[in-house]
Structure formats: C-alpha cells, structure tokens
Image (cartoon, helix red, strand yellow):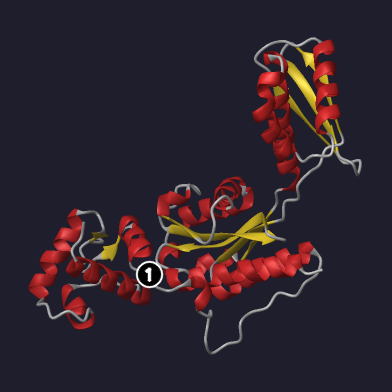
Amino acid sequence: MLDERAKSLLKALVERYIADGQPVGSRTLSRTSGLELSPATIRNVMSDLEELGLIASPHTSAGRIPTAHGYRLFVDAMLTAQPKAVAVDPAQPEPQLQPGQPQRVIANAAHLLSSLSSFVGVITTPRKPTVFHHIEFLRLSERRVLVIIVAPDGDVQNRVIFTEQDYTQGQLIEASNYLTAHYSGLTLDEVRERLKTEIDALRGEIAALMQAAVQAGSEAVADSQDQLVVSGERNLLTVQDLSGDMSSLRKLFDLFEQKTQLMRLLDVSSRAAGVRIYIGGESQAGPFDELSVVSAPYTVDGQVVGTLGVIGPTRMSYERMIQIVDITSRLVSNALSAK
C-alpha cells in the first residue's frame, strides 16, 4: 500500500509524463506536485516507487517514467472524472452519429473514435440473436458430425464437431427431432440455458451431443457475423513512443490485418458493463507492452450487441480516452436503436 504522499507523487509523475513525453525528474516534481517536499525527499519516494515496479528509469536518464503497473494504479485509483459527466472538449459541440444503415453507423463510429483520439478506432459489427427453425446432424465418420442449423429466414449455418463417442445416424436423428420439437423458435443462447436445466431428463449421450451442437452452432453464427472495423491505423506511425521501432510497427499492422486477437479482446470487453481499460500486456493483443486499449460495449434496445474502443500507446490521456469511448458508445447505441 502506498501512503498519500507516494500516491500524490506517482499521480503527478504520470500526468507530467503523459503531457510531455519526457522522463520526469525530482526537481520537476518538486515544482509541479503541489507538495512542499525537497528534491531529496522526492528522490527517496521515487526510489521506493521504482522498487515497487511502478516507475522505471529509461537508459541513463535521471528522470523516471511510469511502468504498465504504474499506469494501472493511476487508472484504477487516481482518475476522478466521471465519463458520462464530462464533454470530450468543452470548446466543441458534442459529436454526433446520424441514424441509418448499421454498416454506415459502424463505419462512421470507427472514424469518429480515430479522429477524436488521434489513435486507432475499432468497433465490432452488431451481433443479432439467431433463432433456429430446424437442426440436423449428419454422421461424417467415427466421432465426426456435421451440424446444420436452419434459421426461419432460410439462413443456414453449419460446422463439423468432434464428439467424445461415436453416434449412429439413428441417434443423430433422435437428437435432431428432439431439439427441433422442443426448442424451435428460440435463440441458440436460450437453447443452451434450457439444456442446462433439463439435462437430467435427457439420456446422457444425447444430452452431451446436443450441448456440443448448440455450442458449435453458436460459434458458427458468431464467425459469420463477427466483423471488426478499424480506422486510423496510420495514426500510430506518428506516435513518438512507437515510431522508432519498425519491427514492432510491422507486427502491429499485422495485428490489425488479422484482427483475430482484437476480436477476442473486444468479445471479453462486451461481457462487462461500462468502460474497460487494458494496459500493455493486459490486452493480450500481441506482444505490445507499449499499447493500451480503452473499450466499452454498445447496445441496441438495451441488449449488448457489440464493442468499440480506442487503441493507442500506453502514454495516452486515459481520462480523455474514457470520455471519447463512453460518448461514442452512447452515440452508437442511440443511432442503431432509432426507429
């Protein structure tokens, strides 16, 4: 635990480094922290903070910079702004997103995130709950089954699953008939929840098959719907903290090109309410300790259907990014919910 003096100095150091991008020395902190402490006392506190892994000394500089752990503590314990109560820029009108086709709203939102943050804006396209009308199982070979899910509008999704035991085609037909008779018209998520409560009434092997099928169907539907819109990748070329390492930049652009890791991260973010912040390696978005992600889910008619966020260097104005992401999330929700 840090005492109030150490917290105040860490907060002042992080804010100064975010503003200037230069290692912060004890004399600078003595002038700007608002604490009546000598440079020598500040050096002692900074030494303690460094031992705790909250700040570090780059190269031979006499100053210190925050580590990912330092940023984490700063974000969790020292930011005081309420995201919904603060405008992005009091001198400018609040940004707008006009209702329209979902694809246009999503594209405009990604661009808005990028332009407001000067970093990278990302947003997943809305997921829609998929209601199934009919399900079929086709035995391909031993313990390999093709699951075919037909929606009321005729849309078809399929996926191959590998089962723990071999099923005859007769057993597969039995499972198909049961699912269609009892669960037709429900979403796959609703079917999954019903199966959890009704599992005891089903034969064990058929229950396991149906659970695997519903999971596979959900994944197939998600794969067909999940898309990631990215805007402003080139903004990172001008970020001082990133532009010096071309190898890292190439890996970074590969990340945006492949998108799989970003999709996984944003999927996790969609399960939490409000703004989430991932600093450095916390994001699991590749080996990029220099990157942070600020994300939030967005809704349609009160249901979470996607996630959006800003990706930038760890040295970013987190307070401002929280405001940008929170406001954009509400704008997207309103634009997509407008009738």
Q: Is residue 163 visible to the viewer in this orientation of the structure?
A: yes
- Quadrant for residue 177, please give it: top right
Residue 130: percent from the left, percent from the top? 78, 44
Please name the amino acid that badge 1 sits on.
Leu
Instruction: Look at the picture and state if 160 lies above or below 311.
Output: above
Q: Which quadrant of the rendered structure holds the N terminus? A: bottom left
- Quadrant for residue 315, please give it: bottom left
Please tell me which residue is depicted at 71% across the width and 60% down the height of the picture: 300
Please tell me which residue is depicted at 35% across the width and 56% down the height of the picture: 68
Residue 171: percent from the left, percent from the top? 80, 13
Residue 2: percent from the left, percent from the top? 20, 60
Q: Is residue 62 visible to the viewer in this orientation of the structure?
A: no
Please tell me which residue is depicted at 74% across the width and 34% down the height of the picture: 217
Left or right side of 86 for 206: right
Identify the element where label 1 is drawn.
Answer: loop
Which residue occupies the foreground of this view, 242 or 191? 191
Left or right side of 155 for 247: left
Q: Which residue is mark 1?
A: 79
Left or right side of 208 for 2: left
Instruction: Look at the picture and state if 85 lies above or below 178.
Output: below
